[in-house]
Amino acid sequence: MKFTIKSIVEGILLEDKEEEDKKKDDPSFTKGGGKVDIQASTGSGSFSKGVSEAGALAQEDPQTLMKNLGISTASGSNDMEKIESLVKQALTGDDAMKRVYSSLSGVSKGNKKALVVKVQEIKARDAVKYMYHTLVGARNAKILKIDSLIQVENHQGDVIIYQGTKRSWG
């Protein structure tokens, strides 16, 4: 079989177009081609039994997790407002969440905005994973619909939630 430069270039262009078409059809990508997901940075190691159970519920029975946490809706005009609405419900609706998280506040750095959830009684690492499971459970229960990449991380012993790539808050 004889290959020409033209046929090779056409093949490459066709592959690029097919890749773009896949991204358009994949709900995990935004219209701009960016990833839509919820990610947590916790490091390696195992988690407490309660954290693991919350993770199992977030995947296998997210409606029960949302009921247990007192979360019914995620209202707002953008992803961060929806997440704030959801977290407020969890912090006021569930006794365990009230013990683990003491407050919710907003912070800004330049034009980036984030939510900070103060942690008490447990390690920040476990608190990050609990919050991650809460957001994933809400997404899986079809309560939270996001259009961007969301990060949940440990920030100075508290949980920080923001839009962007991992560890880009600073």
Image: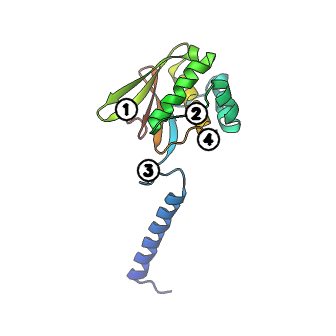
Lower position in the chain sequence, tag 2 or tag 4: 2
Report x, y in % for residue 57.
68, 32
Give the distance between the C-alpha atoms of the residues marked 3 and 4, in whole angstroms. Answer: 21 Å
| Cα distance in 3D space between marks 2 and 4 | 9 Å
Q: Which residue is mark 4?
A: 142
The disc, 2 or 1, on the residue closer to the chain's N-terminal end is 2
Place of residue 70 in the rendered image (x, y in percent of width and height, measured from the top left): 63, 25
Label 4: which secondary element: loop
| Tag 4: amino acid | Lys
Who comes first in sequence, dot 3 or dot 4? 3
Vertical side of 119 occupied by 110: above or below: below
Q: Residue furthest bottom?
A: 2
Q: Which residue is mark 1?
A: 113
Amino acid type, label 2: Thr
Residue receiving disc 2: 73
Q: Which residue is mark 3?
A: 34
Residue 128 seen in render: no
The nearer-to-camera label among 2 and 1 is: 2
Q: Amino acid at mark 3?
A: Gly
Q: Quadrant of residue 63?
A: top right
